[in-house]
Image (cartoon, rainbow, N blue to C red):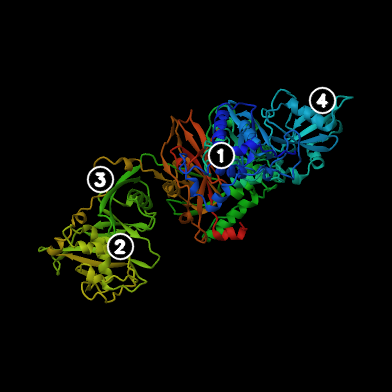
């Protein structure tokens, strides 16, 4: 389409500010009166940005939000001062596509509003075109959208349909609004192929299969759920006997595909030649004022309140057909699993197992694949999943009707059913697994896995299946039975009302704060890592610090809690605990234990000094040469918060300039500028070395001990300079009185749930194990261990409990990690040295009670790196902080690839 470049002479009489004000007023008026059928115009973002900067160049102190235009780079400022040339939209044009009179010139399929183009109301476009001219003109209509059809959207990308004609074996591409009727599509098809209306029947031919005869001429194309780039079969009827060509010749649609369609062009029902299947659908709305010259990546210049969708997919909702939110939430999580999205959008039909007696003769896979493709098709309003629901009811009658069901139970059925429909093994061999009989676990596990893969091989296995080790021990004869079984997901128990308040005194070893008792709430059946994590949160631990947890008895350290998996039940309520903030160091270190002593006339010790107060733990480098003066610096730093105001203020200031770790590069003269403390180092022979003299003498650290023991003897004179009362009282673990609000709301860790799942416990009486040695059924103890983890780890939180008399839902808040879910230490296969770290990308939520609750899904679009809430047909952007709630039910994690894997895969 040729455009006449025309610029009115009087336009140069307007100043940039006058142009800005005029366009602003026109835009405000247009926005208030937008209605269905209005015309908007596409204009390139590049030109629009130039104009925005041009008309704002005189705004030295604008009142709009954001940074001043003068904060832009010099390059941007120098170019924006010039008046824009003619409007030039040619960077939006796709010259490889056909020009169609129905919509004008084709634009690129991959354009995004706010990044590539802006939508302007007709009045705004007319005024700019009057001033500047140029083109080409790219007009688009406003249509109604949404469930109530009361929301307005500009149809930037009308439907592009591929018309395939039988018996002529010809095809043509057409652009048509989704709000056009079947009758209008029927008429256009006849015009294109020069056919009579009564000669033609048109079929929904999505995925190269006949779905429905489109004979209700008053329905819109949106009503019948047509997809971008899908096929429409135009069938010429034999007028003489009123039969179709296809019926007359007995042609099946599977046979006509190879004749009518080029696979490279219509693979998967989506246009691959123009990138329509790449990326994600981003919904952008503009609330930014026209007088703002600053580009905001989160709220780009846009459509003055009218939302649009580009040509990408991934943000399409599912209509609720009547209590089908349980199904919709599970489906959205599956279709947004990248491996499944990629698999079902390609040609997966060749892997369908049509003969598998355990499957659904391929129909479940076909129904799911078709629904997934519709959800990923570009520019779609919410889809009604009626065909899929019908297939589901046929093969799983328990999900039929319109009652609410368990989303996790549906998910389990779908994963299993899709696996059987797509099982690459057509004839399953019979394999009898051998008992371990003392063989190495690695050998037995690989044998079990090979046997499993020999019978089960599908995309579901590739992505979702892992393997755990199951150990049974007979309580009578001690017979051990080890098996390695596959799993599709993990069902983790939630421990309700089993929290425990614990008080721990936290010491800062960098001289920043005084010791302070801290009360937290942890699971009763939790581990030390849960206590340390709770303390870390409560005391605002820095990223370069860690906590060392100890039990103190008789003013000495009784034990270190170094095993993160040690049960908290091993800590009694009358124990006394201390935690020390230690700086993380890359060097080889030892713990320095500072033990306090004071003179006691009744002491039975030879020296007359008796331990008192609470020991303090810090770290000391083993790689560096340590002198007596170095230890003096370290202890001075530890004790600096206890210095009285009337003490050595200068020394206190000097202490705060010294690193809390021993650093041999320091130039501070330690012994001369800091107080000399009465310190004694205990050597390998239990002899005491006086550290108060000979500051430059090297201290030899014992290579056999992980601890360095130092005594500080508090004389009466020294006690007058320090307030040691914070060291003298160490509360018991059980703190009587009301628990703080923070402690009451401390969440249950997902790690704790996993540990409860893996914990050894006896089998329930109704699930007794037949011992092959005793030849009797025994209540054996069972222990599960993770052995092999899948690419996608699905975790089910067991919120629902069932009994004969009632059903109950646990509202427990589970603190699950979104990033860095590290399972490395939970893998029993120690030969697997690879880190097992996962990242959350989707989850289902359940709100309310069991019978009348509601399901939604939180899903992260990985290409966008943004989270969305999928609530049936409604989709909204959410922040990452909103993802973790007490409603979380089923979690979907993807394994994070290591650097080596990325390199080897060429990613």
* Residue wearing tag 3: 735
- In this rendered view, identify the residue nearer to me: 366 or 783: 366
Q: Is residue 526 left or right of residue 242?
A: left
Dot 3 or dot 4, earlier in sequence: 4
Q: Which one is closest to the eye, mark 1 or mark 4?
A: 1
Report the disc number at residue 618. 2
Q: CA distance from mark 3 to mark 2?
A: 26 Å
Q: Which one is closest to the eye, mark 2 or mark 1?
A: 1
* Residue wearing tag 4: 197
Q: Which one is closest to the eye, mark 3 or mark 4?
A: 4
Q: CA distance from mark 3 to mark 4?
A: 86 Å
Q: Identify the element where label 4 is drawn.
A: helix
Q: Which one is closest to the eye, mark 4 or mark 2?
A: 4
Q: Residues within 10 Å of mark 2 (few under 14, many from 20)?
A: many
Q: CA distance from mark 2 to mark 1?
A: 70 Å
Q: Is residue 145 left or right of residue 534?
A: right
The image shows residue 209 at horizontal and vertical percentages of: 74, 36
The image shows residue 125 at horizontal and vertical percentages of: 63, 34
């Amino acid at each position: 389409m040729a455009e006449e470049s025309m610029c009115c002479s009087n336009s140069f009489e307007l100043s940039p500010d006058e142009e800005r004000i005029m366009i602003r007023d026109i835009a405000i008026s247009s926005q208030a009166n937008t209605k269905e059928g209005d015309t908007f115009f596409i204009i390139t973002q590049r030109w629009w940005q130039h104009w925005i900067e041009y008309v704002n160049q005189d705004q030295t102190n604008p009142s709009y939000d954001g940074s001043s235009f003068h904060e832009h780079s010099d390059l941007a400022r120098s170019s924006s001062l010039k008046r824009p040339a003619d409007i030039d939209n040619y960077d939006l044009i796709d010259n490889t596509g056909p020009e169609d009179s129905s919509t004008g010139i084709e634009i690129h399929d991959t354009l995004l509003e706010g990044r590539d183009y802006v939508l302007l109301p007709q009045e705004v476009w007319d005024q700019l075109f009057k001033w500047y001219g140029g083109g080409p003109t790219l007009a688009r209509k406003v249509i109604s959208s949404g469930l109530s059809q009361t929301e307005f959207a500009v149809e930037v990308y009308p439907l592009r349909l591929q018309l395939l004609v039988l018996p002529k074996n010809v095809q043509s591409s057409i652009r048509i609004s989704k709000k056009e009727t079947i009758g209008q599509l029927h008429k256009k098809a006849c015009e294109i192929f020069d056919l009579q209306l009564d000669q033609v029947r048109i079929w929904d031919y999505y995925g190269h299969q006949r779905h429905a005869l489109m004979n209700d001429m008053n329905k819109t194309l949106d009503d019948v759920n047509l997809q971008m780039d899908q096929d429409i079969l135009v069938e010429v009827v034999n007028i003489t006997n009123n039969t179709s060509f296809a019926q007359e010749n007995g042609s099946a649609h599977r046979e006509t595909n190879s004749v009518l369609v080029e696979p490279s062009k219509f693979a998967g029902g989506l246009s691959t030649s123009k990138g329509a299947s790449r990326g994600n659908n981003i919904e952008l709305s503009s609330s930014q004022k026209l007088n703002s010259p600053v580009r905001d990546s989160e709220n780009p210049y846009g459509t003055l309140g009218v939302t649009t969708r580009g040509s990408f997919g991934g943000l399409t909702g599912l209509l609720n057909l009547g209590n089908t939110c349980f199904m919709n939430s599970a489906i959205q999580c599956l279709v947004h699993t990248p491996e499944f999205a990629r698999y079902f959008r390609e040609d997966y039909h060749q892997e369908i197992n049509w003969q598998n007696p355990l499957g659904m003769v391929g129909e479940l896979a076909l129904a799911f694949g078709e629904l997934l493709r519709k959800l990923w098709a570009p520019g779609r309003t919410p889809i009604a999943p009626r065909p899929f629901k019908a297939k589901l009811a046929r093969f799983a009658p328990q999900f039929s009707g319109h009652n609410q069901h368990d989303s996790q139970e549906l998910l389990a059925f779908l994963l299993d059913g899709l696996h059987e429909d797509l099982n690459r093994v057509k004839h399953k061999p019979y394999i009898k697994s051998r008992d371990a009989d003392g063989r190495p676990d690695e050998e037995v596990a690989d044998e079990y896995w090979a046997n499993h893969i020999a019978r089960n091989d599908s995309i579901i296995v590739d992505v979702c299946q892992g393997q755990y080790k199951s150990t049974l021990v007979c309580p009578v004869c001690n017979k051990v039975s080890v098996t390695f079984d596959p799993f599709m997901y993990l069902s983790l128990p939630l421990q309700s009302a089993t929290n425990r308040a614990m008080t721990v005194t936290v010491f800062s070893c960098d001289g920043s704060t005084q010791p302070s008792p801290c009360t937290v709430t942890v699971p009763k059946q939790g581990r030390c890592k849960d206590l340390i994590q709770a303390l870390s949160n409560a005391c605002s631990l820095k990223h370069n610090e860690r906590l060392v947890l100890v039990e103190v008895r008789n003013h000495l350290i009784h034990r270190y809690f170094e095993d993160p998996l040690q049960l908290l039940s091993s800590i009694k309520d009358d124990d006394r605990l201390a935690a020390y903030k230690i700086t993380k160091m890359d060097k080889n270190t030892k713990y320095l234990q500072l033990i306090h002593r004071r003179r006691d006339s009744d002491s039975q010790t030879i020296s007359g000094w008796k331990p008192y107060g609470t020991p303090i733990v810090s770290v000391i480098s083993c790689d560096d040469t340590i002198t007596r003066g170095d230890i003096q610096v370290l202890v001075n730093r530890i004790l600096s918060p206890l210095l009285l105001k009337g003490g050595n203020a200068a020394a206190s200031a000097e202490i705060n300039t010294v690193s809390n770790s021993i650093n041999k590069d320091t130039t501070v003269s330690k012994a001369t500028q800091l107080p000399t403390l009465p310190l004694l180092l205990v050597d390998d022979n239990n002899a005491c070395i006086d550290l108060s003299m000979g500051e430059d003498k090297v201290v030899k650290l014992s290579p056999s001990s992980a601890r360095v023991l130092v005594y500080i003897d508090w004389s009466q004179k020294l006690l007058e300079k320090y307030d040691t009362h914070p060291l003298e009282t160490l509360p018991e673990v059980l703190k009587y009185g009301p628990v703080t609000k923070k402690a009451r709301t401390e969440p249950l860790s997902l790690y704790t749930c996993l540990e409860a799942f893996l914990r050894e416990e006896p089998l329930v009486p109704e699930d007794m194990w037949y011992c092959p040695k005793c030849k009797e059924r025994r209540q054996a103890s069972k222990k599960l261990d993770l052995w092999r983890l899948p690419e996608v780890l699905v975790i089910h939180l067991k919120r629902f409990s069932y009994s004969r008399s009632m059903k109950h839902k646990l509202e427990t808040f589970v603190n699950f990690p979104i990033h860095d879910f590290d399972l490395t230490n939970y893998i029993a296969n120690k030969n697997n040295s690879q880190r097992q770290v996962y990242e959350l990308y989707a989850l289902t939520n359940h709100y309310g009670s069991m019978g009348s609750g509601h399901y939604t899904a939180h899903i992260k679009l990985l290409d966008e790196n943004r989270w969305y809430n999928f609530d049936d047909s409604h989709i909204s952007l959410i922040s990452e902080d909103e993802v973790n709630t007490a409603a979380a039910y089923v979690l979907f994690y993807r394994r994070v690839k290591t650097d080596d894997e990325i390199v080897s895969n060429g990613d």
